[in-house]
Amino acid sequence: MGESKLFTEAKLGPITLRNRTIRSAAFEGMCPGNAPSEQLYDYHTSVARGGIGMTTVAYAAVTRDGLSFPRQLWMRPEIVPALRHLTDGVHAEGAKVSIQLGHCGNMSHSAITGEMPLGASGGFNLYSPTFVRQLDADRIKKIAKAYGDAVRLAKDSGFDCVEVHAGHGYLISQFLSPYTNHRKDSFGGSLDNRMTFMRMCIDEVQEAAAGEIAVIAKVNMRDGFKGGLEIDDCVTVAKELEKKGLDGLVLSGGFVSKAPMYVMRGEMPIKTLTHYMDCWWLKWGVRLAGRFMIPTVKYQDLYFLEDALRFRSELKMPLIYVGGCVSRSGIDKVLDSGFEFVQMGRALINEPDFVNRMRDGEERCGCDHVNYCIGRMYTIDMVCHKHCGDLPKCLKKEIEDIKARNGK
């Protein structure tokens, strides 16, 4: 093993990051009214001040019908000044700033979007729960164009990079996966056909970016369940994005509506998840069936690395590793394996200054992987339990029980 690359500069398309770390696009839940808040500003500037190379503002819907939660960004001209305030604050701390652009497809509800959710195919989504309407060709074109419009707004807002969400069972992923795409037209059937919508979105994004900001995408390496995309098909998708000239790929996996903990690993804290819910019938439904709907997937450090190495061997483009980066030695292992950057989420929720702490000699972050932050973020905001003050006794007990099951 040679000298560590962690604190060396590196280019990502037209931009240069001061080190190899990126705050992953973990949903913050800090955008009431679908607009940036001071809480969002404070969080991302704290991560920038904490030494990150680039921080990512998470999940901005390209259209209103792409929203999956009430406290989520929706890209539109009136929020540009508030986004510019955020990017100026991050830049003042020496970091770059990216924004993740996406459309949730069938993972929404009419109470949020004002209409029946839209998907690659129609049917019923138990995740919401709601009926879903299949997108027609005209609406598909409008959504693809909206990706380009969102990039133009991101440029006007001062972002250095955009991350297109093409994984985790969101709309592009819904077109790619045979689990959610049952179409018989040119957008369905073969994998090549199922990539058509992705190509349309990326073409609009690239045209809008015009080489002036970096363009990356988050992709699945596996959907994480039988009947979804497996690694060979996902390699084909990644190679298609490489041909499209993207500046980098974030290698992830899982399907939020089918295999959510394949994405995040560990145990979903069901009591925490339901404690903050307003809808009584959904609260009790999740309490009764949550363990079956959201099964535990064991956490381990660098849990995506084995699959990611396959992609590293097949692709020449810059690759961004995400998944269980919680220690200096683990991050060095990833960088020594040929990945240009690492993304971190939970480590920076617990310790926004973890990058500076590593520079000062800290080996491992203090995250204990009880996933309280995940259970909470869907209905209120994304905060580590260690920063929440005095929690209700039932939630404290759940945290301690999960820690005990994790051997901590």
Image (cartoon, rainbow, N blue to C red):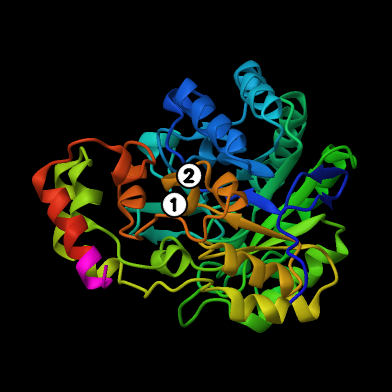
- For label 1, the residue is 107
Residue 346 coordinates in the image, percent (x, y): 45, 53
User: Is 23 covered by the magenta stretch?
Assistant: no
User: Callout 1: few (<14), some (14-19), or many (20+) C-alpha neighbours within 10 Å?
Assistant: many
Taking 180 as reference, is 306 above or below it?
below
Q: Amino acid at mark 2?
A: Phe
**Residue lying at 50% horizontally and 32% vertically, measured from the top left:** 43
Q: Foreground residue, 385 or 315?
A: 385
Q: Is residue 368 visible?
A: yes
| Magenta region | 403-408
Q: Foreground residue, 289 or 365?
A: 365
Q: Amino acid at mark 1?
A: Met
User: Is 405 covered by the magenta stretch?
Assistant: yes
User: Callout 2: few (<14), some (14-19), or many (20+) C-alpha neighbours within 10 Å?
Assistant: many
Task: State how far apart marks 2 and 1 are (Cα).
Answer: 15 Å
Residue 223 coordinates in the image, percent (x, y): 53, 72
- For label 2, the residue is 27
